[in-house]
Amino acid sequence: MSESSNTKTPFLALADYEKRSLVHAVGLPEQIQAQGAWSGIGFRLGELYLLVGLKEVAEILHLPPMTTVPGSKAWLMGIANVRGNLVAVVDLRGFLIGQRTKLSDSSRVLVIRQEGGNVGLLIDEVLGQRHLFDDDNSDQGGFEETIVAPFVHRGYRKDDIEWGVFDSIQLTQTTEFLQAAAA
């Protein structure tokens, strides 16, 4: 054994291991973004398959315990404490068509980032992350005559499913959404 290997401190030994391992490191696939790629979270609202941009979603939750807000519209389910932050939880179907979402084991809340604090959208089911390419683009994807038409401006066709890109930021900035107080 050489004298240097006997006198290495644990820190120097770890630094040496790191230096030698980095020589053989290969780039991580997560760091490579393909040209024309778009990634989002797929979800279902009734029979509609929708996507919301990854950067718009702060987290995905099971329906949290909530405190109701007296004098609010029926679609505002309540306020939840999510890790110390107050999040308004909105029944998306209730907001769009006035019909309550039937809760099931697959129901989830998409916590959407927005100025002034996050908002939770109750949806029927989360379908996971989707990676789509320009070749999959299908304009609005047949969502023109649906309840989500004002918030879907682009669509994709992938695996025989029409996916509408749902603009959650536009939703949270509409006058109707901002007026949660009952008339």
Image (cartoon, helix red, strand yellow):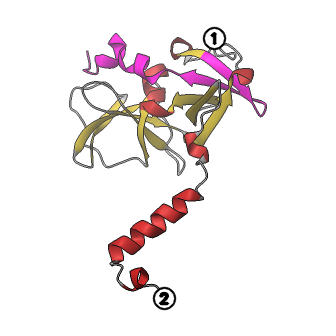
- Residues 45 and 169: in front is 169
Pointer 2: what residue? 1
- Residues 140 and 27: in front is 27
Mark found first going from the N terminus, 2 or 1: 2
- The kind of secondary structure element at disc 1 is loop
Can you tell which quarter of the image residue 85 is in?
top left
Please name the amino acid that badge 1 sits on: Glu
Is-magenta flag for residue 159? yes
Q: Left or right: 90 with respect to 86? A: right
- The kind of secondary structure element at disc 2 is loop
Magenta extent: 154-183
Please name the amino acid that badge 2 sits on: Met
What residue is rendered at 61% in x and 46% in y? 29
Where does residue 8 sit, x and y in percent of width and height?
36, 79
- Residues 59 and 10: in front is 10
Pointer 1: what residue? 144
Where does residue 122 sit, x and y in percent of width and height?
44, 36
